[in-house]
Amino acid sequence: MKTRRLFVLLVGIALLIAASAAEATIHRVRPGDSIQAAIDAASPGDTILVSPGVYEEEGNSDYGLRIATDNLRIIGKVRPRKGEAGKVRLLHTGTQQTGIYAAPEGCEFKDSECPEQLEGFYLRGFSVEGFPVNGIQTRWVDGFKFVRNESVNNLNNGIY
């Protein structure tokens, strides 16, 4: 009897995990599209795949990209041996200070405290270029991972 209960419990857990994974969405961004629009449309657990190209996000006056969604994966699909044409390049425009800023909603870089934490942020394959303060910055983030990103000519910190 105990074996049967354990089996039913394990099957239930497996179904719950499978249902959660099935709900995750993949958002695709191509040159000319807005990466920030995909980030804003994403839900926790989603993945954003960004094709190689030059991206100049103009929607935010402080940041190139602003991430405030838990468990978000943003992946630049870099093409090796293609040089600059094979990179996902985020370039500075206007008054932006930081290229990519990840923190909970309502918690900005000038704040000394934040009541929440952003969980599980993943960023891979970006070249963040020419920002006057930081290339990539996180605050109040737990469980983040940066893989194969570049910071190019950012004046204060590359990754902070």
Image (cartoon, grey):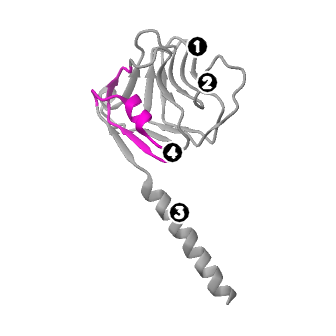
**Mark 3 or mark 2, earlier in chain:** 3
Q: Residue at x 36, y 20 (%)?
A: 56
In the rendered structure, which disc, 3 or 4, sits on the residue that comes first in sequence?
A: 3
Q: Residue at x 55, y 13 (%)?
A: 133
Amino acid type for the residue under numbered disc 1: Asn
- Circles 4 and 2, Cβ within 8 Å, touching? The answer is no
Sequence-wise, the earlier of marks 3 and 1 is 3
Quarter of the image where one finds residue 130: top left
Q: Which residues are magenta?
A: 31-57
Where is residue 141 shown, x and y percent of the image? 63, 35
Instruction: Name the quadrant containing residue 136.
Output: top right
Q: CA distance from mark 3 to mark 2?
A: 34 Å
Of the residues shown, which amino acid type is indicated by label 2? Tyr
Instruction: Say which residue label 4 marks.
Output: 44
- Helix, strand or loop at mark 4: loop
Residue 131, compared with residue 8, is above or below; it is above
Q: Earlier in the sequence, mark 1 or mark 4?
A: 4
Left/right of residue 87 with respect to residue 152 in the rendered view: left
